[in-house]
Image (cartoon, rainbow, N blue to C red):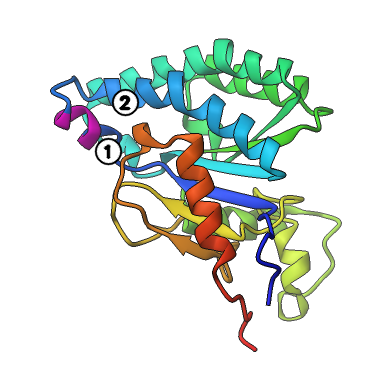
Amino acid sequence: MQPSNHIPTHIAVIMDGNRRWARVHGLPILEGHRKVANDVLEPLIEHAATRGVKYMTFWAFSTENWNRAETEVRGIMMIFRHVIKKRWARLHEKGVRIRVIGDLAKFPADIQKSLNDVIEQTTNNTTITAVFALNYGGRDEILRAIETWRANPKSQIPISKLTQEEFSNFLDSKGIPDPELIIRTGGEQRLSGFLLWQSEYSELYFPTWFMPEFTPEKLDEAIGEYQQRKRRFGK
């Protein structure tokens, strides 16, 4: 049994409810996304670092999100540009390392370049690692990992002898520990393909409040709930 004061090394968040929050408040849909980008993410990452969390992953854009209305997708791209230029620069000043998982090839070229630049710029930061899942889907990640393994000329391991540890090195999350706690905001109780490989023994927390309402105090509540769980790992 874990100690009652154990802090998870890695917390992952399925950011759900932005649009519902905007509707409840009589606002345009994009205002929910903007609220999270401007007011929610930075305080959460900072607070997680003070609590001793080493990695925090945010599912910001799924492979299915491209199917939303063109105006919404275009607006989200504009928010991404603002976040990368302004908000992530602030995180860099605070020692936050930025990593991205997902297939970035579908994003506009300027966003791809900005993402690669900030990843490189923050690579030596050590306060906490903030991971953003962009154009990410769990099945898509696994399929791309298989393609990467097949294309790797140094890989002489027959697939029948490929271990879980070795396969993990072909995933987007290489070097990132599996999340001990996954939080999905907005009340839905499913993972929707998020971190399919990595979530094998993750504890799941499904609060009813929306992502724009996610405060540092609510993060403390989630950690407190996690500390009450008994993790048996199949034993």
Q: Which quarter shows the N terminus?
A: bottom right
Relative height, residue 102 to residue 36 (above, below): below
Q: Amino acid at mark 1?
A: Asn
Which SS type dominates the magenta stretch?
Answer: helix
Relative height, residue 36 to residue 151 (above, below): above
Residue occupied by mark 2:
73
Q: What percent of the width, then of the height, locates residue 149? A: 71, 58
Residue closest to the eye, 218 or 91: 218
Q: What percent of the width, then of the height, locates residue 233? A: 63, 80
Q: Amino acid at mark 2?
A: Val
Q: Secondary structure at mark 1?
A: helix
At x 58%, y 71%, the residue is 201
Can residue 21 be found in the magenta stretch?
yes
Image quadrant in which you'd find residue 30: top left
Give me the C-alpha separation between circle 2 and circle 1.
Answer: 8 Å
At x 48%, y 59%, the residue is 139
Which segment did they paint magenta? 20-24
Query: Residue 99: which numbered mark, if any?
Result: none
Residue occupied by mark 1:
67
Q: Which quarter shows the C terminus?
A: bottom right
At x 61%, y 85%, the residue is 234
Residue closest to the eye, 48 or 81: 48
Q: Residue 99 vs residue 103: left or right?
A: right
Q: What percent of the width, then of the height, locates residue 71? A: 23, 20
Can residue 35 be found in the magenta stretch?
no
In primary-sequence order, the first of circles 2 and 1 is 1
